[in-house]
Structure formats: structure tokens, C-alpha cells
Image (spheres, rainbow, N blue to C red):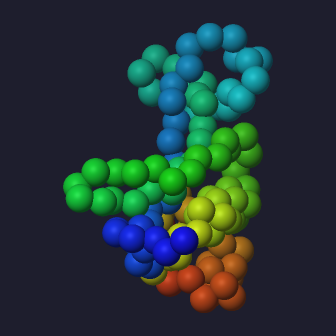
Amino acid sequence: MKKKGALSKPLTLAVDWHDEMYYGDPKAEGIVGSMPKQGSCLAYRFATISVLLNGERLTLAAVPMLDRCIFWHVKRLIDAVFELGLSVELLLFDRGYFSTELINYLIGAKIKFIMHMP
């Protein structure tokens, strides 16, 4: 089946890190410590990979972030995009994603990227 429309071309994708603040039991599954915000230092932490289409953000995949192994979270997100049959033109990262391991992987995989360096 041939893809049509905006998802048929290589995409510019953004990888984002999210903390949804949590106020309950600190031992609850999936909860991590975070920077204090909105009266809590606990959060559900997850990463997403999204594309902007016609002014609307479309989240293609999300993965939990129970540890700070940035490389594996991003690899899982990219793999999910490829499993959807989509191709990547460019990946965008903010400074929270700066990692030598990630940079080496992206270069080796011939994936173009822009990454904010701290």
C-alpha cells in the first residue's frame, strides 16, 4: 500500500522529555524524582517523538523514562517511527538530550539531527 499525504515524505521530528507532576505515594510504580515544581518533587516521566502537521502536533510514540539512559529512550522512539513505516528527514532535540552515545548512534545510523548543547 502506497502512503499518501504528509506522512509519505521524510519527516522532521521532535523528541521531547515530559514530567507530569505526581502528588501521591512516592513508591507508586512509574514514579521518579524530579526537580520541584507545582508543589511536588515526584513525576511520571516519559519521552515522546512528534511531528508538526498543518499546525497540529501528532505524537507518533511515547516511552516511559524510569532511568536517565537517554540513548535507549531515543532509540526506542526512533524504532517505533520506523515500525510505522515512516522515514526521518531530521530529528530535533533540546539540551536535555545531549549525549555522546546518542550522537555517535545518530551519525552511525545516518540520521540528521539538531541538538542543543549545554
Q: Is residue 118 left or right of residue 106?
A: left
- 86 is higher (above) or lower (below) than 52: below
Q: Position of residue 47 (x, y in %)?
A: 57, 48
Q: Is residue 115 visible?
A: no
Q: Quadrant of residue 65?
A: top right
Query: What residue is rendered at 59% in x and 42% in y?
Result: 46
Q: Is residue 63 left or right of residue 22?
A: right
- 41 is higher (above) or lower (below) than 96: above
Query: What residue is rendered at 68% in x and 88% in y?
Result: 108
Q: Is residue 62 visible?
A: yes
Front-lying residue, 43 or 14: 14
Query: What residue is rendered at 23% in x and 55% in y?
Result: 55
The residue lying furthest to the front in this view is 1
- 95 is higher (above) or lower (below) than 61: below
Q: Position of residue 83 (x, y in %)?
A: 66, 64
The residue lying furthest to the left in this view is 55
Q: Quadrant of residue 73?
A: bottom right
Query: What residue is rendered at 59% in x and 69% in y?
Result: 85
Q: Position of residue 118 (x, y in %)?
A: 47, 67
Q: Is residue 53 left or right of residue 99?
A: left
Front-lying residue, 17 or 51: 51
The residue lying furthest to the top in this view is 24
Q: Position of residue 68 (x, y in %)?
A: 70, 50
